Image (cartoon, rainbow, N blue to C red):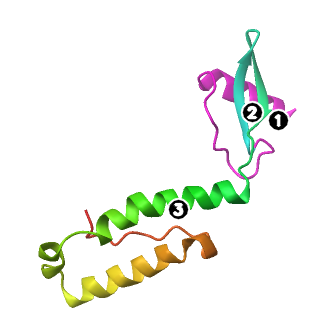
Amino acid sequence: MENLKVKVELAATVQHGMYLELVRQTTLQHKMIAEVDGYFVLVDIPQPTMEEKLDELRYMRLHQCFSVINRGKLWYDKLSPTQIHELQQWYTAWLDVTATMQIPTKPYWIS
């Protein structure tokens, strides 16, 4: 009965087709609410394949990492030795992302 209550509360608070990130203790993980014939129903969210996950990581690396790493000499000349070291570690972590499956945390000073 508790799950039914959660479902009803969620249905009342989300919009059509919105993906849900639910707390871990519920049984509703990897579900989305969809409207079917005027009713809200819970449906499974298709889980990505390993290759799709790797492709997403590569895409993220291309746009989040390489756009920083490929900045010019003038930008690099402004960095302190500590910043250069942090940048090298971050870059290496991005190069290893398809093996580690861990998205590196960008150093706070990179804009």
Q: Nearer the viewer, mark 3 or mark 2?
A: 3
Label 3 Cα crowd, 10 Å radius (few <14 / some 14-19 / many 20+): some
Whole-angstrom CA distance, mark 3 to mark 2, is 36 Å
- Find numbered disc 1 in the image and state the secondary structure of the residue it sits on: helix
Q: Position of residue 2 (x, y in %)?
A: 83, 36
Looking at the rendered structure, the kind of residue marked 3 is: Arg
Q: Position of residue 105 (x, y in %)?
A: 43, 70
Q: Residue at x 76, y 51 (%)?
A: 25
Would residue 9 be seen by someone viewing this image from the given angle? no
- Find numbered disc 3 in the image and state the secondary structure of the residue it sits on: helix
Q: Is residue 40 left or right of residue 13?
A: right
Of the 4 image quadrants, the one containing the N terminus is: top right
Disc ID at residue 58: 3
Disc ID at residue 6: 2
Looking at the rendered structure, the kind of residue marked 2 is: Val
State which region is magenta: 1-28
Looking at the rendered structure, the kind of residue marked 1 is: Asn
Which residue position is annotated with label 1? 3
Q: Is residue 69 left or right of residue 24?
A: left
Would residue 81 be seen by someone viewing this image from the given angle? yes
Above or below, 93 against 45 in this view is: below
Label 2 Cα crowd, 10 Å radius (few <14 / some 14-19 / many 20+): some
Above or below, 84 against 45 in this view is: below
Q: Position of residue 16 (x, y in %)?
A: 62, 21
